[in-house]
Amino acid sequence: MKIITVHFIAKPEYQSALITLCKSMIGPSKAETGCIHYSFYQDLNEENKFFFYEEWKDQSVIDLHNTTKHFLDFQPKLKKMIQGEPAVTVYSVGY
């Protein structure tokens, strides 16, 4: 299993649109074969800080996810709405 976290900070003027955009990823991503968990969070203390938490069966399903229409449409929109680059961390769970 692989776990992915993606942390990012919204540009204040895009906060509402970013929330809508990110929520739109949840349903299609959860419907993908091999997706175990997919969720989106907002920091309670810093309202422009967000992150995704994802669990996937293995790297092959992540590779497929990264080629889906919803993911490819999402990427350029997100980059426009955030400060800097997202911090992506991938964990391998081997228990």
Image (spheres, rainbow, N blue to C red):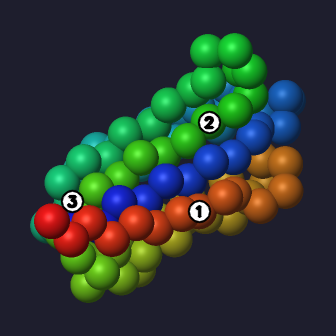
Q: Nearer the viewer, mark 3 or mark 1?
A: 1
* Residue positioned 32% across, 47% down in the render: 38
Q: Name the foreground residue: 64 vs 21.
A: 64
Residue found at x 84% / y 48%:
83
Q: Nearer the viewer, residue 71 or 46?
A: 46
Between the residue at mark 2 and the residue at mark 1, the CA separation in whole angstroms equals 12 Å
- The answer to whether residue 66 of the structure is visible from this angle is yes
Task: Indicate the position of residue 61 as horizontal and vertical percent values.
Answer: 25, 77
Residue wearing tag 2: 50
In-image side of 55 versus 20 (left or right): left
User: Which of disc 1 and disc 3 is earlier in sequence?
Assistant: 3
Q: Pointer 3 and pointer 1: residues touching (CB < 8 Å)?
A: no
Amino acid type of disc 1?
Answer: Val
Dot 3 or dot 2, earlier in sequence: 3
Name the residue at 69% across, 32% down: 49
Q: Considering only order in the chain, which callout, 1 or 2, is on the residue closer to the N terminus?
A: 2
Residue 47: percent from left, percent from top: 71, 20
Q: Where residue 75 sits in the image (x, y, percent)?
A: 61, 64
Q: Nearer the viewer, residue 8 or 75?
A: 8
Read off the residue under disc 3. Answer: 35
Q: Which residue is mark 1?
A: 88
Front position in the image: 68 or 54:
54
Left or right of 51 on screen, residue 65: left
C-alpha separation, residue under disc 3 versus residue under disc 1: 17 Å
Numbered disc total: 3
Image quadrant containing the C terminus: bottom left
Which of the image's four quarters has the N terminus? bottom left
How far across and how far down the image is residue 19, in percent?
58, 32
The answer to whether 10 appears left or right of 34 in the picture is right
Q: Is residue 70 visible?
A: no
Q: CA distance from mark 3 to mark 2?
A: 20 Å
Task: Give me the residue at 61% from left, 15% from top.
Answer: 44
